[in-house]
């Protein structure tokens, strides 16, 4: 897994105050008045309420496979290691670790302070059991890295992990592996339907005390025996909130994400604080080259890339609060980003030229291209309700290049299921975990389909596979970057998928209620908002 780029944070309140002082002047009296009216900033809270919604039971087997489900699970369960926003590896259930010279064996000392919510000790037996259990029963989320081939107990507080190939990202990959208690799960033979209270026993900072699938509510309370620092928030409640803006303004929930067009409601008001995050969460256009062989032609995909105006998508759909997507997949802030990779600046005429070279003509002048059999060039575009407007604009762009699009808008879970099964021709999908180029490879199960990312169906490039493996093994940062630059250039030329744009996030909260929100993640339900590991 590639290291994530740092997320840029801007406190709009601070910026607005700065420019106000710069251009209008801030007298001492005015400054005192502002200080007198500014609400107290609280770094701890008894209760925080956030908008609910059902994302499944928060275990590796019971959750729905998208971010909100995983983040709730991570309030309860722990991994051996964690990663900071800058990619630095930090201890969690592991306290120390070392690798063999060949990078194939890792010896890991376990955290002696960690214990399960029910008071039972956490030991090496739990780690070995989790590995073996998850090999037999594949979890929805939080599974062990595919590269692990053996986990063995050295003593109660030490495990040895052996992997099949050296990988400089192996330790960071461990941050997604959730450890479960042997004494609870060893008798469970149907883990996907195991939703009793004891299923949610973890070692994490919070305990689940209530969950309602029907109402989409969750109630977490701080774990007094947590091995890390004391949680800053005693209780976290996910509550029904039909209209989140109204619920926020009526003090029913404590933080929301807003669009730029309503930002003025909260600007210049000391009651609110606005944080802006630049993220790697992106919408992407996926091609099913098996369902539609035309898409297997590289210049055909390049034509689509030229036809879609990604800057207009940013302006129209996100009102400027996004970054146009990179055909090389990685966000411009990623440490490995190659700015010289092909960009496909919007050019409808270039798109038409490429299509013409492939033999597609508008023989009857109705605006839609036909193949040499006279068949209209028409595609079904699968999207969910949340990306329907995006699909409409893409439909317009492709129509200008002579490509007809028929939109099939469904609910998110239906789209995710069809996407995972490859039941689409073109598909818009979005997530925050698509920067890893592994899904463009055919290496083992690295590019396996999920509800949020998928192997580019019908795409295979041996050089991409080789370069991806090479960068995994390369320990020299400079050489690894060179490999990544070359890999991105090939991917950008091939366009096996097209990143449309990376979303920015504008979040609003009341500092007087709680001002401990993380500056490293825009997700209001992320663990780092409530506790320091």
Image: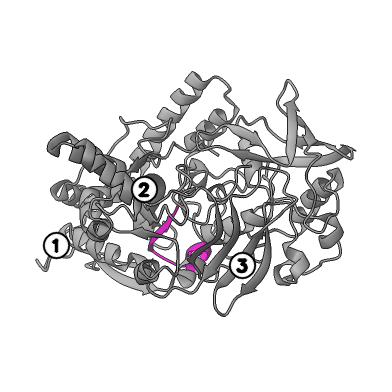
Query: Is tag 3's residue or tag 1's residue first in the polypeptide sequence?
Result: 3
Q: Is residue 371 above or below residue 353?
A: below
Residue 345, percent across and down? 21, 42
Instruction: Report the quarter where the C terminus lies.
Output: top right
Looking at the rendering, the stretch of residues picked out in magenta corresponds to 418-431
Q: Nearer the viewer, mark 1 or mark 2?
A: 2
Q: Is residue 417 left or right of residue 235?
A: left
Q: Which residue is mark 3?
A: 219
Crowding at dot 2, Cα within 10 Å, few <14 / some 14-19 / many 20+, comes out as many
Front-most of residues 2 and 446: 2
Residue 343, percent across and down? 27, 39
Numbered badge on residue 275: 2
Residue that sits furthest to the bottom in the current view: 214
Q: Is residue 91 left or right of residue 38?
A: right
Front-most of residues 251 and 327: 251
Query: Is tag 3's residue or tag 2's residue first in the polypeptide sequence?
Result: 3
Query: Is tag 1's residue or tag 2's residue first in the polypeptide sequence?
Result: 2
Instruction: Tell me which residue sits at (37%, 73%) in the image.
Output: 243
Element assignment for label 3: strand
Question: Are dots 3 and 1 in contact, CB under 8 Å?
Answer: no
Alpha-carbon span between mark 3 and mark 2: 26 Å
Magenta span has 293?
no
Q: Which residue is mark 1?
A: 362
Crowding at dot 1, Cα within 10 Å, few <14 / some 14-19 / many 20+, comes out as some
Element assignment for label 2: strand
Instruction: Tell me which residue sits at (54%, 74%) in the image.
Output: 216
Alpha-carbon span between mark 1 and mark 2: 49 Å
């Amino acid at each position: 897994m590639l290291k994530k780029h740092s997320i840029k944070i801007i406190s709009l309140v601070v910026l607005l105050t700065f420019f106000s002082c710069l251009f209008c002047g801030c007298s001492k009296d005015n400054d005192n008045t502002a200080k007198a009216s500014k609400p107290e900033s609280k770094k701890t809270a008894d209760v925080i309420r956030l908008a609910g919604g059902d994302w499944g039971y928060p275990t590796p087997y019971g959750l729905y496979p998208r971010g909100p489900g995983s983040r709730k699970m991570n309030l309860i369960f722990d991994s051996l290691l964690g990663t900071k926003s800058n990619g630095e590896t930090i201890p969690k259930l592991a306290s120390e670790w070392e690798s063999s010279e060949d990078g194939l064996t890792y010896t890991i000392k376990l955290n002696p302070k960690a214990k399960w919510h029910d008071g039972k000790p956490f030991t090496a037996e739990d780690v070995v059991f989790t590995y073996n259990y998850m090999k037999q029963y594949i979890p929805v989320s939080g599974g062990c890295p595919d590269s692990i081939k053996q986990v063995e107990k050295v003593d109660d507080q030490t495990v040895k992990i052996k992997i099949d190939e050296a990988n400089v990202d192996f330790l960071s990959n461990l941050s997604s592996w959730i450890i479960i208690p042997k004494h609870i799960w060893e008798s469970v033979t149907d883990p996907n339907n195991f939703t009793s209270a004891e299923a949610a026993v973890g070692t994490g900072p919070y305990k689940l005390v209530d969950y309602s699938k029907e109402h989409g509510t969750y109630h977490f309370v701080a774990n007094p025996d947590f091995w890390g620092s004391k949680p800053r928030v005693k209780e976290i409640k996910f509550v029904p909130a039909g209209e989140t803006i109204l619920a926020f303004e009526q003090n029913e929930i404590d933080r929301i994400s807003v669009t730029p067009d309503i930002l003025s409601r909260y600007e210049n008001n000391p009651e609110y604080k606005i944080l802006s995050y630049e993220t790697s969460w992106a919408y992407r256009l996926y091609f099913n080259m098996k369902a539609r062989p035309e898409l297997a032609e590289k210049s055909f995909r390049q034509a689509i890339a030229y036809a879609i105006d990604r800057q207009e998508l940013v302006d129209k759909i996100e009102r400027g609060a996004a970054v146009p997507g990179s055909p090389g997949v990685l966000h411009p802030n990623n440490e490995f980003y190659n700015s010289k990779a092909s960009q496909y600046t919007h050019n409808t005429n270039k798109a038409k030229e490429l299509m013409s070279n492939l033999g597609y003509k508008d023989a009857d002048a109705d605006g839609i291209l036909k193949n040499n059999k006279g068949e209209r060039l028409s595609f079904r575009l699968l999207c969910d309700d949340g990306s329907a407007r995006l699909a409409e604009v893409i439909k317009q762009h492709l129509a200008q290049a002579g490509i007809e699009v028929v939109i099939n808008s469904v609910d998110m879970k239906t789209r995710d299921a069809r996407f995972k099964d490859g039941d689409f021709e073109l598909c818009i999908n979005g997530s925050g975990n698509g920067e890893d180029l592994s899904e463009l490879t055919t290496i083992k199960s690295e590019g396996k389909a999920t509800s949020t990312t998928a192997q580019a169906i019908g795409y295979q490039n041996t050089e991409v596979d080789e370069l991806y493996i090479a960068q995994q093994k390369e320990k020299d940062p400079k050489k690894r970057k060179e490999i990544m630059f070359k890999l991105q250039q090939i991917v950008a030329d091939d366009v096996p998928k097209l990143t449309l744009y990376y979303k920015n996030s504008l979040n609003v909260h009341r500092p007087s209620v709680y001002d401990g929100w993380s500056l490293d993640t825009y997700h209001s339900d992320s663990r780092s908002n409530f506790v320091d590991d």
